[in-house]
Image (cartoon, helix red, strand yellow):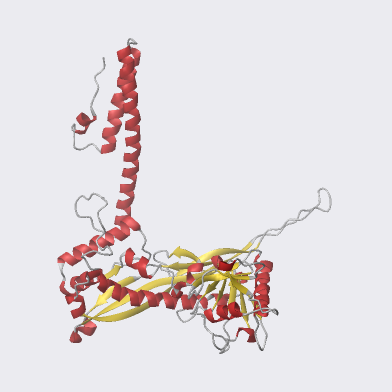
Amino acid sequence: MPRRIAITQLFSQGDKMSLLDNLKEARSAAAADAEALLAGEATAESLDAVEARQSEIADLDSKIESATALEARTASIKEARAAEGVQAFGSAVVTNEPKTYEARSENSFVRDMIMATTRNDQGSWARLNRHMDEVRVETRAVGRTDGAIGEFVAPLWLLDAYSGVARPGLATASLLTQQELPAATDSISIPRITTGTSTAFQASDNSTASNTDMATSTVTAPVRTLAGYADVSIQLLEQSGLSAGIDQLVFKDLVADSDRALNTAVLNNSDGTSGTIQGVYNAAGTSVTWTEATPTGANGQKAIAQAISQIVGARYDRPDYIVMHPTTWYFLASAVDGNGRPIVVPTAYGPFNANGVVTEAGAAGGVAGSIHGIPVVVDPTMAKVSTTQLPIIVGKFSDSYLYSSAPKFLVAQDVLSSSLGVRFVMRKYVALAHRYAKSYAAITGTGTVAQTGF
């Protein structure tokens, strides 16, 4: 009877063989064993042995598949580390150990940045480098990663806590199609078809068919830098017992305000020059004028319906959101018809035949309700035009692509060394590309004048 070769034997035959090689050799041995058994005398014992070998082969096939995937993933990680210039120190095993800078970790990302860059503390450098490996290799969530000494990407839990939370600062920016900013680029170019092909019914058999050659253009968006800094006393960083609290203190102000600045630029009349991005109000290809000395909810809803119609007729698709200042929304929510009935009603009381509905009572930012079935987003960063008017923007916001990198921080002590202060500088890169001008309609006019008391 053929001799069964144990997997453990194969693993001990040489250190040079990989796990995958060992598994493949073990499978070959088991398969040869099974074939020899089948070629021999058919007995109850031999049939049981064949069944055992087949079960072993199936188990080895599963292990070979896992080992193959593991080797491919390991090779991919090595390529990523080489591309990023990450230095490898010996052999490493990927486990499910906690990240270097967890939300309640004893390690402080901010404090380690200070100790590493100002005192060359090797323990701090080791933790920071380990953290950057985690970000680069495990998450790969960093765009435009630079390698300057003293510059690091924040832990993802901090970015999730202060950049991803639904807050007024990102009420409109979050509606756009989000894209990771590609590395090493100063502009984003998106090809766009400006003239499509054509078809038509033939006048008669063998007559010339309709023909229009396709024409294309490019939508180009420059990459802009959004930056700011905060000065912190070194005593606070060194003496505070709240490691994560320091990180939150620094990141909350800088990241939250960068959200506000980004959203303001995305929403309003910035034209894309002088280092800015082009806002959706500036990019709106159609406009509706709401003229009314004493604005009413009925005419406001009529203007919104006209804007929806403009987009449907020009973009040939439905708008996905209506954006307005909270002042405008709560004014419309207070409006009544000729019989004193509210035009925008709460869902809590079972609205019947309502053009507008409140779905989030007292919303300060984000989706607050709907008008004509289109979600309404309130955004307090909406800026006035013509001094007094708060425009309403109806649009297919998903047509616009917002590219952004992760926020990056560097620390500088020299500029504040005489006062024992440390400067944290934050920057991120963004680009905004509007694919179709007809995706947006802006409502302005005397009817959009901010109402007293709202």
Q: Position of residue 274 (x, y in %)?
A: 46, 82
Q: Nearer the viewer, residue 248 or 139?
A: 248
Q: Residue at x 48, y 76 (%)?
A: 364
The answer to whether residue 411 shows anywhere in this view is yes
Q: Quadrant of residue 358?
A: bottom right
Q: Is residue 253 above or below residue 7?
A: below
Q: Quadrant of residue 355?
A: bottom right
**On the rendered structure, is 71 left or right of 166?**
left
**On the rendered structure, is 346 left or right of 85?**
right
Quarter placement of the N terminus: top left
Q: Nearer the viewer, residue 147 or 51?
A: 51
Q: In this view, which residue lies farthest toward the right?
A: 204
Q: Position of residue 71 (x, y in %)?
A: 31, 43
**On the rendered structure, is 11 left or right of 347?**
left
**On the rendered structure, is 389 left or right of 56?**
right
The answer to whether residue 445 shows anywhere in this view is no
Q: Nearer the viewer, residue 448 or 334?
A: 334
Q: Residue at x 34, y 77 (%)?
A: 253
Q: Residue at x 57, y 75 (%)?
A: 283
Quarter placement of the C terminus: bottom right
